[in-house]
């Protein structure tokens, strides 16, 4: 499974068309110890939160579809740390818990949404795939593969229309990258120079179909070429590489140069959803990635090099476990929505 | 021998137009394909080309003349060749400066044929006004005859002047001034930031509009016709309609999807479909489908102001029809209220959009047979004003639903169900549905006519429920 572990020379992607301006090759972010510790904390929070969600699913407390982000943590944490939280918009598909946690949304209300409780962020009416926080400028949480790309282009349209200096980061997977509306959105985004970062989280599998079985051009960062959108391939298992790419992309977009594509080479450890036995890949393949390129281990080793001791990391882990356990307790003990909630919020107004 | 040039029809429903400009003068020689004049209607401009070769003898209708009826002789040509004459030499010898007097025998060109079609009958029925004043309009208000097309444009422009967040986006809405000229003049007034031409990319721009609404703007997304909105229906249903509910009331989506819906004239199956029942079945949407110009304006303004996603279904055949629109600074109608278009006591005819014209025409004919029909225009299809429908049923005890659309799982079916569930004791006869035939709309004029709803079938059904 070296292809996820060692994306081929991410920094040396050849320019799509040499005579057109390209963003500079992103540099791996030079994080201070505190910055890296914070990223580590966030990645660990996502990891432990998702593990707990998996357990609660097993206990029947979470139902329906539940897509875990385990393995991909560096992408959301690294990229979103380069954004202006609460100002820049973020939108993603149904594998959304990690992006919310990385944007500072309270784990309790996310977990309570997973268990379908009134205290959930969508009052229990959205579930795993449909969560939003307008306050945080997190716009979902969309269950239709690829829809968030057009919607995100609309959010970018809003930033430009309002001239508020903000941008939109729209995440989608290697599967969604084959949807037609993605290219309709690419076209309009470049035509109108909209401030949007298209992030393709290439975790190698669209449900059970590997990228090579589904994509004529499997180097997804090139998918914007015919729209003149530059693309960069990034090691999505390295949080600092992700952060560096996020910085470069945000700079490009904020300069009014239009959209940019980041292809994040990453890997999900769990099945597509909880109900996926993942028979399409070997246990060894997953194990190899976990051992060689786990983003959290990677950051831990880096922190150790910076002089952070094992005891401090353990302390962080303990603290995270406490937060996650609290969120699980909150989610289990909160009441279900009152029955009259059935008819609320269908429409805003009364006619 | 002179050839008569007649005012051409630019569309199957065109009856008259403006002779905007002559590009030739008497004495000019013309050959096949030369542009002779520019003809305008309220929705289109066309260049009128020469078919025959010859010399322009006389211009009979001056440029700038409005209301020139289709078929009027607008000029004469002294001909060289007859018929198409494509192989004839292009440079015909110039005739004398003064054209020959027009008294000489002329060779009539064929009259543009007025084909009797179903759409034309719908179009002709759509001249009927309401017989009672709109309750929302203060007595004594001055009325201005306005086309539905202009009323829609005025509604958008008035709202856009008041709220910077409103913008219009769609195919050909800006520089072309609208495929059906509904957005005429908006680009000039509001500029390209707020009146935006999109590529032909319905799924994409419906998503962009929906995302912009989620972000806090107030988009008006025009579909050139709702037939093309099927490419985008995912965003209308899955993204726009459901978000408020799925987010526990956190994320709103105040957007208007608008454009012509239903059958146009002779455009066949893929371009002739009424989607009202589709959208009206979706919780989370507001669905409006007006008949006359006042409702088009008042309800479009309400739709733009609504915090909810609205599907606003217009009708191409109605665009050019004129109705009274109240001259008020801010004429807004309530969403979700049906309207009595004509009071009556014997039978209720319920309809919406272009069907209202058919129902009013049928009511007129029924009056001649001693049946006093009440006509209800639903106007909003979701939420449905069942109260007004049931009240009318309680009064007449008989009901026919008229719908330019398919019969199965239709608005008519819904009204029939409502009447049965909630008005059973008031029914003296079964509710009948008069709709289009249950087939894709055919092209052939006679078949199209047979497929579309028409007045005669409404009259027949009304008589049947009155046991006459």
Image: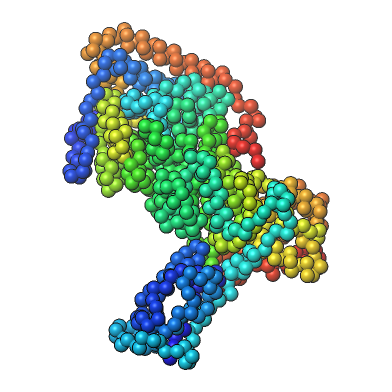
The front one of A1 and B350 is: B350
* Drawn side of residue B52 relative to residue A346, left or right: left
Q: How is the image coloured?
A: rainbow
Q: Is residue A175 left or right of residue A339?
A: left
Quadrant of res A242: top left
Q: Residue at x 53, y 75 (%)?
A: B70
Q: Nearer the viewer, residue A253 or A201?
A: A253
Q: Which residue shows up at 36% across the image and 81% down it?
A: B28
Where does the image place residue B117, in percent across and percent down from the top left? 58, 72
Res B25 quadrant in image: bottom left
User: In the rendered image of this protein, does residue B400 appear above or below residue B17?
Assistant: above
Q: Is residue B255 visible?
A: no
Q: How many marks?
A: 0
Tell which residue pokes out farthest to the front in this image: B98
Q: In the rendered image of this protein, does residue B313 appear above or below residue B51?
A: above
Using residue B144 as the reference point, say whether residue A21 is left or right of it.
left
Q: Image quadrant for the N terminus of chain A?
A: top left
Q: Position of residue A70 (x, y in %)?
A: 37, 26
Rendered position, B102 above or below A104: below
Is residue B329 toward the left or the right of residue A29 in the image?
right
Image quadrant assignment for residue B115: bottom right
* Viewer-proximal residue among B26 and A305: B26
Query: Which quadrant of the rendered structure holds the C terminus of chain A?
Result: top right
Is residue B143 in view from this perspective? Answer: yes
Task: Residue A151 in the image: state x and y as whole percent.
Answer: 43, 40
> Which residue occupies 56% across, 60% down?
B319
Q: Position of residue B198 (x, y in %)?
A: 40, 50
């Amino acid at each position: 499974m070296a292809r996820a572990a060692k994306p081929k020379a991410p920094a040396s992607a050849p320019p799509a068309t040499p005579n057109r301006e390209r963003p500079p090759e992103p540099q791996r972010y030079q994080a201070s110890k505190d910055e890296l510790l914070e990223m580590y904390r966030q990645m660990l929070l996502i990891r432990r939160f998702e593990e707990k969600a998996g357990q609660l699913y097993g206990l029947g407390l979470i139902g329906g579809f539940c897509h875990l982000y385990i393995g991909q943590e560096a992408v959301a944490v690294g990229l979103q740390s380069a954004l202006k939280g609460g100002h820049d918009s973020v939108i993603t598909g149904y594998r959304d818990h990690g992006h919310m946690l990385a944007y500072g949304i309270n784990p309790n209300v996310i977990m309570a949404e997973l268990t379908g409780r009134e205290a959930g962020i969508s009052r229990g009416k959205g579930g795993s795939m449909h969560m939003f926080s307008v306050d945080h400028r997190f716009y979902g949480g969309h269950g239709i593969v690829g829809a968030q790309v057009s919607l995100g282009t609309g959010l970018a349209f809003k930033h430009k229309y309002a001239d508020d200096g903000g941008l939109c980061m729209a995440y989608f997977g290697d599967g969604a990258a084959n949807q037609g509306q993605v290219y309709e959105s690419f076209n309009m985004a470049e035509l109108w120079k909209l401030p949007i970062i298209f992030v393709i989280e290439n975790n190698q599998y669209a449900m059970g179909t590997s990228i090579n079985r589904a994509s004529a051009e499997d180097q997804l960062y090139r998918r914007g070429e015919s729209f003149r959108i530059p693309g960069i391939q990034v090691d999505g298992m390295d949080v600092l590489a992700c952060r560096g790419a996020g910085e470069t992309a945000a700079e490009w977009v904020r300069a009014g140069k239009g959209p940019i594509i980041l292809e994040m080479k990453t890997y999900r450890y769990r099945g597509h959803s909880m109900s996926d036995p993942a028979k399409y890949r070997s246990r060894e393949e997953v194990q190899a990635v976990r051992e060689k390129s786990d983003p959290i281990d990677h950051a831990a080793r880096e922190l150790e090099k910076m002089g952070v001791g094992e005891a401090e990391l353990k302390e962080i882990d303990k603290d995270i476990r406490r937060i996650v356990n609290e969120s699980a307790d909150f989610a289990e003990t909160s009441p279900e929505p009152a029955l009259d909630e059935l008819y609320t919020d269908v429409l805003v107004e009364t006619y | 021998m002179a050839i008569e040039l007649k005012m051409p029809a630019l569309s199957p429903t065109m009856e008259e137009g403006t002779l905007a400009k002559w590009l030739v003068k008497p004495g000019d020689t013309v050959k096949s394909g030369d542009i002779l004049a520019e003809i305008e209607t309220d929705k289109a401009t066309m260049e009128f080309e020469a078919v025959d070769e010859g010399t322009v003898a006389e211009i009979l209708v001056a440029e700038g003349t409005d209301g020139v009826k289709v078929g009027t002789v607008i000029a004469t040509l002294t001909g060289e060749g007859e018929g198409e004459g494509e192989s004839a030499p292009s440079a015909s010898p110039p005739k004398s400066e003064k054209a020959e007097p027009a008294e000489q025998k002329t060779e009539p060109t064929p009259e543009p044929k007025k084909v009797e079609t179903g759409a034309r009958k719908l179009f002709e029925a759509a001249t009927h006004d309401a017989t009672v004043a709109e309750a929302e309009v203060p007595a004594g208000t001055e009325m201005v005859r306005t086309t539905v097309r202009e009323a829609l444009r005025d509604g958008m422009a008035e709202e856009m002047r008041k709220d910077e967040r409103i913008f219009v986006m769609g195919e050909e809405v800006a520089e072309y001034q609208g495929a059906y000229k509904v957005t005429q003049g908006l680009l000039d007034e509001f500029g390209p930031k707020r009146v935006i031409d999109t590529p032909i990319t319905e799924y994409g721009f419906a998503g962009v509009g929906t995302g912009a609404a989620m972000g806090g703007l107030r988009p008006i997304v025009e579909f050139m016709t709702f037939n093309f909105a099927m490419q985008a229906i995912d965003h209308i249903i899955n993204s726009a309609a459901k978000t408020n509910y799925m987010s526990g009331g956190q994320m709103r989506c105040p957007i208007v999807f608008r454009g012509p819906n239903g059958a146009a004239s002779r455009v066949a199956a893929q371009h002739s479909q009424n989607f009202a029942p589709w959208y009206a079945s979706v919780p989370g949407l507001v669905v409006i489908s007006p008949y006359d110009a006042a409702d088009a304006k008042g309800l479009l303004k309400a739709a733009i102001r609504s915090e909810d996603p609205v599907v606003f279904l217009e009708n191409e055949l109605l665009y050019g029809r004129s109705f009274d629109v109240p001259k008020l600074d801010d004429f807004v109608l309530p969403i979700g209220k049906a309207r009595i278009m004509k009071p009556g006591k014997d039978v209720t005819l319920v309809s919406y959009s272009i069907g209202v014209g058919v129902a009013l025409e049928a009511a007129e004919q029924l009056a001649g047979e001693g049946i006093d029909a009440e006509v209800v225009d639903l106007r909003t299809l979701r939420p449905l004003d069942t109260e007004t429908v049931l009240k009318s049923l309680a009064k007449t005890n008989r009901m026919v639903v008229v719908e330019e659309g398919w019969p199965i799982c239709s608005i008519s079916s819904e009204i029939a169900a409502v009447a049965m569930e909630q008005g059973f004791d008031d029914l003296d006869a079964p509710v009948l549905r008069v709709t289009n035939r249950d087939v894709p709309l055919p092209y052939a004029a006679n078949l199209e006519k047979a497929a579309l709803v028409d007045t005669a079938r409404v009259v027949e059904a009304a008589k049947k429920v009155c046991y006459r």
